[in-house]
Image (cartoon, coloured by chain):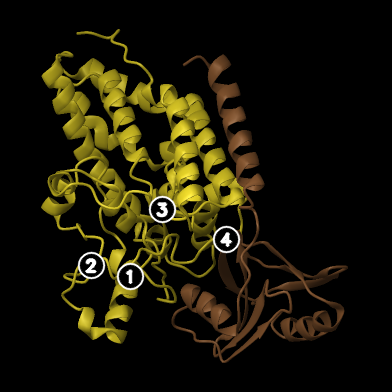
Chain colours: A brown, B yellow
C-alpha cells in the first residue's frame, strides 16, 4: 500500500478510535472501592509483601501502603491499577495534591489528587521513605 | 536463481481490516456488555505502537532483507514459488516463529523487544497491534537463515511471516470463547493465546505458537485455558506509564542500568542480557520459574496440574 494512503489511514484510524472510546466514557480511571481493593491491587504486583496498613485517599484514586519491606503507593492505570515502592521517591506538593517522582523508567511520575488535610498526612508519610 | 520475485506487503494491506475489526469488537462489547474491555489510553498506546512498528519496518527492514539476500546469493537451492512451496514455507516459518517467540520469553535481550506486546493489562484486538519497534536489534533474523538456505526466496519467507502476523490478529480477543474442538486441537485460537498473555503463575511461559498450536504440544509448552482460572493480563510488574516511548524502550533501559552497575563480574553483566527475564546476580528478583515455585509452595495442590507439570 502506498505511504500516501497508509499514513492518512493510520492517522485517521487512531484518532477516530480514540475519539470513539472517549465518547463512550472509556477514559474514566478506575476507583479503588475500599481498602481491600487497594490491598488486592498491591498484592497483584507484590504478592510476597502483604500490606500491614492501607490508607485510601478520600477520592479512592490512590492508596498508601505500608508493608514489611517499606511503603508503597497504588494508583490507577486507566481501567486497571499498578503499584510501586516509594524507595528513592521525591515528593512535591501541588495545588491538587502531591506529585511523586520515582527513579523508575516505567513509572517516573505519579500525580495524586488529595484534599489539603490528607496532603499533609500523605506527604509526611511518604517523605519517610524518600 | 530468481532475484526479482515480489509478493504483496500483506500487513499494510490488512490495515483497513484491522481498523474495521476493532470497531466491530468494540461495538460488540458495548452492546453485549461482555467479551472484553477497552480503555482509551491503553488502546491509543497499542495503536501508536502498531503504527511505530510499521514505521520501524520501513526504516530498518533493509537490514534483515539485506542479510536474507546475502544468504540467497550463496545458496545453490531455489524451490521456486509453486503453491506447495508457499504452503511448506508457511508451515516452516510458523515453526521458526514458535522458536523466536520462545526465545523472546526466555532470553532477556529478545524479551526487551517483545515485552511491549505484553505490556497492556487489556486483551482486545488493539493489543494485537502492540508490536515491537526494536526487533531488528535482537538479531533473531538469523533463525530464518535455514529457510533461505533451503531455497525459499526471502520475499516468500517475508510474505509468509506477514500472513502469520495477520492470522494472529484475530486471536487477541475475549469476545470469542472456544472454537470447535478440531480447530482448537491444531490451530492457535483466542483461548490458547489468552493463556499466553496471562501473568498468572500457571500461564507463564506457555503457548508460544503463532498459527499452529501443535508446536507447543510437540515441545511441551502447551497449557490449556482453565475455566476456573481466568487469565490476568499484563506483566508480572505492570507499567506505570502509557508513554509509548517508555513502553517500547523500558526493558532496554533496564538492561543498560543492570549491566553498568558497579561491582559485577563480566559473566554477571552478560547474564543480565541473556538470562531469562527476572534473573539477577543477587537473586533479588524472580524469574518465571521462581514465581511458579513460590506459587506451588503456597498452593501445593496445584502441583502436576496444567502449567505446573515440569520446570523448564
Q: Give the alpha-carbon distance from disc 1 to disc 2, as whole Å.
A: 8 Å
Local packing at callout 4 (Cα closer than 10 Å; few below 14, some 14-19, many 20+) is: some
Q: Are marks 1 and 2 in contact (CB under 8 Å)?
A: yes
Q: Which residue is mark 4?
A: A79
Local packing at callout 1 (Cα closer than 10 Å; few below 14, some 14-19, many 20+) is: many
**In the rendered structure, which disc, 1 or 2, sits on the residue that comes first in sequence?**
1
Image point (23%, 85%), residue name: B300
Q: Nearer the viewer, mark 4 or mark 2?
A: 4
Q: Quadrant of residue B36?
A: bottom left
Q: Left or right: B106 with respect to A42?
A: left
Say what secondary structure mark 1 lies in: helix
Q: Are marks 2 and 3 in contact (CB under 8 Å)?
A: no
Q: Which residue is mark 1?
A: B201
Pointer 4 and pointer 2 on the same chain? no
Say what secondary structure mark 4 lies in: loop
Q: Give the alpha-carbon distance from disc 2 to disc 3, as whole Å.
A: 25 Å
Say what secondary structure mark 3 lies in: loop
Q: Give the alpha-carbon distance from disc 4 to disc 2, as whole Å.
A: 28 Å
Q: Are marks 4 and 3 in contact (CB under 8 Å)?
A: no
In the picture shown, does residue B116 fall above or below B205?
A: above
Residue A2: x, y in percent?
Answer: 50, 14
Image point (72%, 81%), residue name: A126
Local packing at callout 2 (Cα closer than 10 Å; few below 14, some 14-19, many 20+) is: many
Q: Nearer the viewer, mark 3 or mark 1?
A: 3
Pointer 4 and pointer 1 on the same chain? no
Q: Left or right: B174 with respect to B143?
A: right
Nearest to the observer: residue A71 or residue B151: A71
> Disc 2: which chain?
B
Q: Nearer the viewer, mark 4 or mark 1?
A: 4
Q: Which residue is mark 3?
A: B35
Amino acid at each position: 500500500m502506498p505511504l500516501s494512503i497508509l499514513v492518512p489511514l493510520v492517522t485517521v484510524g487512531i484518532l477516530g478510535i480514540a475519539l470513539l472510546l472517549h465518547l463512550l466514557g472509556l477514559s474514566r480511571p478506575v476507583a479503588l472501592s475500599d481498602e481491600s481493593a487497594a490491598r488486592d491491587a498491591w498484592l497483584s504486583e507484590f504478592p510476597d509483601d502483604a500490606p500491614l496498613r492501607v490508607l485510601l485517599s478520600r477520592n479512592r484514586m490512590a492508596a498508601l501502603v505500608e508493608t514489611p519491606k517499606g511503603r508503597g503507593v497504588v494508583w490507577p492505570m486507566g481501567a486497571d491499577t499498578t503499584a510501586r515502592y516509594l524507595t528513592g521517591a521525591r515528593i512535591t506538593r501541588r495545588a491538587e495534591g502531591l506529585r511523586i517522582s520515582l527513579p523508575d523508567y516505567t513509572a517516573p511520575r505519579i500525580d495524586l489528587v488529595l484534599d489539603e488535610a490528607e496532603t499533609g498526612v500523605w506527604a509526611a508519610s511518604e517523605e519517610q521513605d524518600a | 536463481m530468481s532475484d526479482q520475485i515480489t509478493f504483496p506487503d500483506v500487513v499494510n494491506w490488512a490495515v483497513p481490516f484491522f481498523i474495521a475489526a476493532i470497531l466491530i469488537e468494540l461495538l460488540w462489547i458495548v452492546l453485549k456488555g461482555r467479551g472484553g474491555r477497552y480503555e482509551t489510553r491503553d488502546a491509543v498506546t497499542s495503536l501508536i505502537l502498531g503504527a511505530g512498528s510499521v514505521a520501524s519496518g520501513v526504516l530498518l527492514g533493509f537490514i534483515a532483507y539485506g542479510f536474507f539476500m546475502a544468504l540467497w546469493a550463496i545458496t545453490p537451492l531455489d524451490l521456486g514459488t509453486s503453491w506447495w512451496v508457499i504452503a511448506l514455507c508457511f508451515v516452516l516459518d510458523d515453526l521458526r516463529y514458535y522458536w523466536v517467540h520462545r526465545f523472546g520469553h526466555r532470553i532477556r535481550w529478545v524479551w526487551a523487544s517483545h515485552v511491549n506486546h505484553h505490556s497492556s493489562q487489556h486483551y482486545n484486538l488493539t493489543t494485537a497491534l502492540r508490536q515491537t519497534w526494536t526487533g531488528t536489534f535482537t538479531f533473531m533474523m538469523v533463525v530464518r537463515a535455514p529457510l533461505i538456505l533451503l531455497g525459499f526466496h526471502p520475499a516468500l519467507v517475508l510474505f509468509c511471516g506477514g500472513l502469520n502476523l495477520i492470522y494472529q490478529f484475530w486471536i487477541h480477543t475475549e469476545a470469542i470463547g472456544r472454537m470447535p474442538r478440531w480447530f482448537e486441537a491444531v490451530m492457535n485460537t483466542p483461548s490458547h493465546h489468552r493463556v499466553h498473555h496471562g501473568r498468572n503463575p500457571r500461564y507463564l511461559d506457555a503457548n508460544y505458537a503463532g498459527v499452529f498450536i501443535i508446536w507447543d504440544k510437540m515441545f511441551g509448552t502447551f497449557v490449556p485455558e482453565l475455566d476456573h482460572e481466568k487469565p490476568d493480563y499484563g506483566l508480572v510488574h505492570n507499567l506505570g506509564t502509557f508513554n509509548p516511548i517508555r513502553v517500547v524502550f523500558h526493558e532496554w533501559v533496564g538492561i543498560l542500568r543492570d549491566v553498568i552497575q558497579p561491582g559485577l563480574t563480566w559473566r554477571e553483566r552478560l547474564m543480565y542480557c541473556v538470562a531469562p527475564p527476572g534473573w539477577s546476580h543477587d537473586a533479588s528478583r524472580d524469574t518465571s520459574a521462581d514465581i511458579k515455585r513460590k506459587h506451588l509452595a503456597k498452593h501445593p495442590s496445584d502441583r502436576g496440574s496444567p502449567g505446573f507439570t515440569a520446570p523448564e
